[in-house]
Amino acid sequence: MKVYRTTVQSKGSFKGWTSNLCSVTMGYKPDKDKYFFIKVWSQQSKEGQWLKPHFSKKQIDTIKQKVK
C-alpha cells in the first residue's frame, strides 16, 4: 500500500524552552493505521547551538491528528 508523507508544524520542547514552529515530516500507512517520523528539523538556540526538539505523548497525539 502507498505511504503518505506530509509535513506538519507542532509545538516542540527543548532544554529550557519551547517552540510552536517545529516542523516534522511524518509518514502514514492507512492500511495498517501506522504513523512514523521521517524527519525532524533542528532549531537554533540563542546560544547558537542546533537542537532537535523532544515531543511529549500529548504533542505526538496532536501531530498524529494533524497527519490524519
Image (cartoon, rainbow, N blue to C red):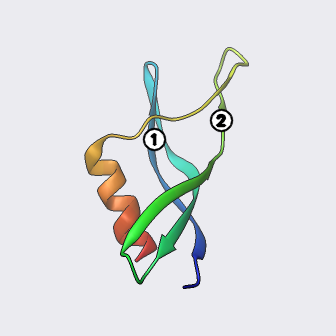
Q: Residue at x 34, y 70 (%)?
A: 65
Question: Residue 14 at what x, y percent from top left?
Answer: 48, 27
Please tell me the numbered disc located at residue 43. 2
Does residue 60 appear to the left or right of 67 in the view shown?
left
Q: State which tag comes first along the sequence, 2 or 1.
A: 1
Quadrant hosting residue 16: top left
Q: Secondary structure at mark 1?
A: strand
Does 54 sit above or below residue 45? below
Look at label 2 and name its amino acid.
Gln
Front position in the image: 31 or 66: 31
Which of the 4 image quadrants contains residue 55? Answer: top left
* In the rendered image, the vertical position of residue 54 relative to residue 58, given as above or below: above
In the image, 6: left or right of 11?
right
Q: Residue at x 57, y 78 (%)?
A: 4
Q: Residue at x 59, y 32 (%)?
A: 52
User: x, y (%) of residue 59?
Assistant: 34, 50
Image point (33%, 60%), residue name: 62
Q: Separation of disc 2 and disc 1 at Cα?
A: 10 Å
The percent coordinates of residue 45 (x first, y second) are 64, 24
Q: Are marks 2 and 1 in contact (CB under 8 Å)?
A: yes
Mark number displayed over residue 12:
1
